[in-house]
Image: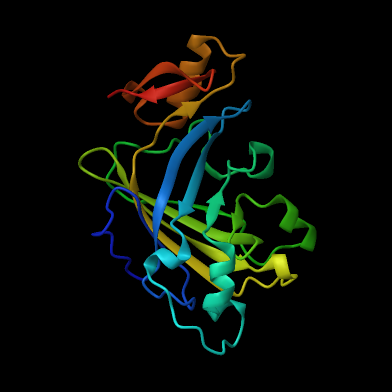
């Protein structure tokens, strides 16, 4: 992965689309890392990212571009990027499978942990409708072959290195010929769990999928039960 400089905005990060008109990438204005435990006890991580407006990095002189990806005018028309497993509703994105019962995600360890989603090649073209994340980039496009690496920092937050491949399906191009790379520093905000669980059951589910259940207390997030990190 190419190095992305976070010095200008360490609390959020940057996202780069190699080959687009802004080689230094774009600031990230919104980012959320959240978790949820499903009915089967699996832990999923959702990520939500919204970039600053593309032109916030400075306007680029328009020239004859080889394609939409390298055209400043095309990028300006679409404003900014949203890459998310939650923004368009949970039914439209699964996020990353982070842990299964007995195979926990290690919040205490400093060793980087890698998760993946939607490896290429896709078996069927219909899989484009059921990807783990959605993206608005140059219109409503598609993202696959994703990898995210979480590395714990001394303050308990994590350095997040996230990358994947993009197909400009808004213009009927189903080839994943483009890339994104993002670097973010962020904490895990909460882990939601099914409301049907008792507190004891919810705790059993939590300790089966994270190595540090003592880091969390019960709470509510948007009216739904959740494990919230102790502050």
Residue 164 drawn at (x, y percent)? 52, 63
Q: Quadrant of residue 189?
A: top left
In the image shown, does 132 or 57 lie closer to the viewer?
A: 57
Q: Is residue 46 above or below residue 201?
A: below
Q: Is residue 208 above or below residue 21?
A: above
Q: Quadrant of residue 91?
A: top right
Residue 191 drawn at (x, y percent)? 47, 28
Which residue in the rendered view is the most extreme toward the left? Answer: 154
Quadrant holding the N terminus: bottom left
Q: Is residue 226 visible?
A: yes
In the image shown, does 68 or 208 lie closer to the viewer?
A: 68
Please give the count of numbered marks on the rendered protein. 0
Q: Residue at x 44, y 64 (%)?
A: 181
80 relative to 129 in the view: left or right: left
Q: Residue at x 63, y 25 (%)?
A: 39
In the image shown, does 42 or 36 lie closer to the viewer?
A: 36
Q: Is residue 103 visible?
A: no
Quadrant holding the C terminus: top left
Q: Residue at x 67, y 67 (%)?
A: 121
Residue 19 drawn at (x, y percent)? 48, 78
In the image shown, does 35 or 7 lie closer to the viewer?
A: 7
Colour logic: rainbow
């Amino acid at each position: 992965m190419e190095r992305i400089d976070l010095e200008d905005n360490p609390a959020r990060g940057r996202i780069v689309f190699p080959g687009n008109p802004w080689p230094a990438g774009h600031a990230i204005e919104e980012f959320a890392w959240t978790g949820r435990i499903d009915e089967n006890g699996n832990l999923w991580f959702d990520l939500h990212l919204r970039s600053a407006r593309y032109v916030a990095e400075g306007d680029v002189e328009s020239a004859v571009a080889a394609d939409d990806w390298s055209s400043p005018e095309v990028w300006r028309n679409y404003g900014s990027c949203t890459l998310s497993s939650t923004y368009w509703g949970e039914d439209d994105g699964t996020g990353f499978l982070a842990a299964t019962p007995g195979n926990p995600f290690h919040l205490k360890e400093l060793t980087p942990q890698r998760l993946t989603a939607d490896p290429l090649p896709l078996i069927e073209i219909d899989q484009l409708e059921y990807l783990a994340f959605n993206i608005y980039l140059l219109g409503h496009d598609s993202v696959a072959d994703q990898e995210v690496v979480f590395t714990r920092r001394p303050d308990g937050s994590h350095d997040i290195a996230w990358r994947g491949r993009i197909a400009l399906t808004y213009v009927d191009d189903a080839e994943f010929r483009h890339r994104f790379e993002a670097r973010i520093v962020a904490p895990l905000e909460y882990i939601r769990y099914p409301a049907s669980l008792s507190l004891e059951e919810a705790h059993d589910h939590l300790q089966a999928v994270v190595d540090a259940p003592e880091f969390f207390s019960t709470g509510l997030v948007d009216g739904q039960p959740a494990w919230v990190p102790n502050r």
